[in-house]
Image (tube, rainbow, N blue to C red):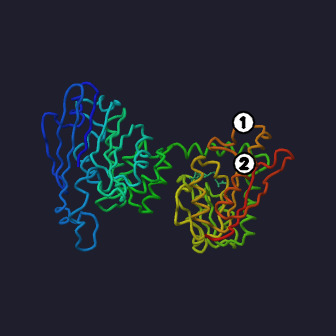
Amino acid sequence: MLLTITTTERPATDLGYLLRKNPARVQSFPQSFGTAHVFYPEATPERCTAALLLEVDPVGLVRNRRGPAGEGYSLRQYVNDRPYVGSSFLSVAIGDVFGSAMSGKSKEHQELAERCLALEATLAVLPCRGGEKVLRSLFEPLGYTVKARGYPLDSRFAEWGESPYFTVSVEGKVRLSQLLTHLYVLIPVLDSDKHYWVGDDEVEKLLRRGEGWLASHPQRDLITSRYLKYRRSLINDALARLVDEEDPTADEAQEAHAQEEAQVEESISLNEQRLGTVLAALKSSGAKRVLDLGCGEGKLLQVLLKERQFEQIVGMDVSFRALEIAKDRLSLDRLPEMQRQRIQLLHGSLMYRDKRLAGFDAAAVVEVVEHLDRPRLAAFERVLFECARPATIVLTTPNAEYNAKWEALPAGKLRHKDHRFEWTRAEFRAWAEGIRQRFGYRVHFLPVGPEDAALGAPTQMSVFARAKSK
Ligand code: SAH
């Protein structure tokens, strides 16, 4: 397996300093699965290429039980693509051989390590599960120009179709440490396999290597799932933390903004009316097991806990801080055992499928949708209406039209700085109508708060009832 890294940034041979490998020498580094060699096929002031050649020893792999999983004796253990393609072996070698360059450190040329350079990396053979489309969707959002050449499975049998193998080059103006980090994470993601057991520390590794780019990557779900080998609990952990990472100050800002929103809405104590209406809808649905999704600081949970009808109450939020406050508000630590068993708080994101949300009778989603990025609404819809799929869903959101009536609110402004959008009544209905059709729910609408003849009520609520269980 061959990886080359080329720069045309003069003097190009400075690449040797950054990689801490002398362009004039060939060096070899033993790995537990074979040997990594580093050499420079070209090294001129105009253009310099460093090559990492990885020899993977398939027989050694079987002996060390690191080969591809095979039941008992199988030829696949000995004859497979691992020695020839980019895979997690290559990532391990990159980390080992170019570790200091990947972490952005350079003894002699720190300023060069911090500079964006014209760099191109070429992988002789890279398995790309999902094909060129997935390959591009991973590197292009990071600013690379991608070139890919695919190969048929067997050139003599065109009808067998394409192989997953590509010769890939990615080119961009980036720091060397970024290029190496992107390769380190994305090679095994494209290969969608790993030669070692994926445990908790893999989450830490992903978050560390993904710092600064993964949280905002449009394919972060795919990257995370594949990187963590589809291990649901690890993925949930990583994704919840990635959402948090997007804006480290978000929790505090959220708190301050929530207070502002409360002030705007205070005059009619809208919050109380909202809680009352939601509670009534949940009660009349006959639900025993209820979810409060995006429960925030737990105001609704507090109300639910007082109602004996609800035997199991689960609050979920993406904000760890909000959950801490909820825990205090509910005095969870001091509740008598019977009460304590009725309620549970979960840290998680509504953007991701979550097994823990299955099997409930009803869910409340109170003033949450408008906090979600519009392009990500579709993910939320599937998580709630397709995966969790409770019989009843009570959802509230501001009515944008009513904002004209708030004295404290300048025209055209949203009620809360963290709101990504606010819907008019027509927009909300159109959205809910789409849900009804796509997911098999009936829906009806209720105004919450004092209704204005022209503008409607300040809060709009929809109650979805599952029409058929999928
Ligand atoms: N339902 C509460 C809080 C509303 S504020 C109430 O009515 O008081 C919106 C809440 O949604 C915040 O607590 C925020 O942390 C949460 N939230 C935002 N994005 C989320 C996501 N992707 N998954 C889960 N919760 C989310």
Q: How many marks?
A: 2
Disc 1 to disc 2, C-alpha distance: 16 Å
Name the residue rendered at 27%, 52% in the picture. 85
From the top left corner, tell me how far across and down residue 414 is, in percent: 69, 40
Residue for point 50% across, 49% down: 244
Which residue does the numbered mark 1 point to in the structure image?
Answer: 412
Q: Please identify the quarter of the rendering in which residue 145 is found.
A: top left
**Label 2 environment density (alpha carbons within 10 Å; few <14, some 14–19, many ≥20):** few
Quadrant of residue 284 within the rendered picture: bottom right
Numbered tag placed on residue 364 in the rendering? none
Residue 227 horizontal side relative to residue 410, left or right: left
Q: Position of residue 327 (x, y in %)?
A: 57, 60
Task: Reply above or below: 245 against 354.
Answer: above
- Residue for point 22% across, 63% down: 79
Q: Which residue is mark 2?
A: 427
Kind of residue indicated by mark 2: Glu
Nearer to me, 212 or 186: 186
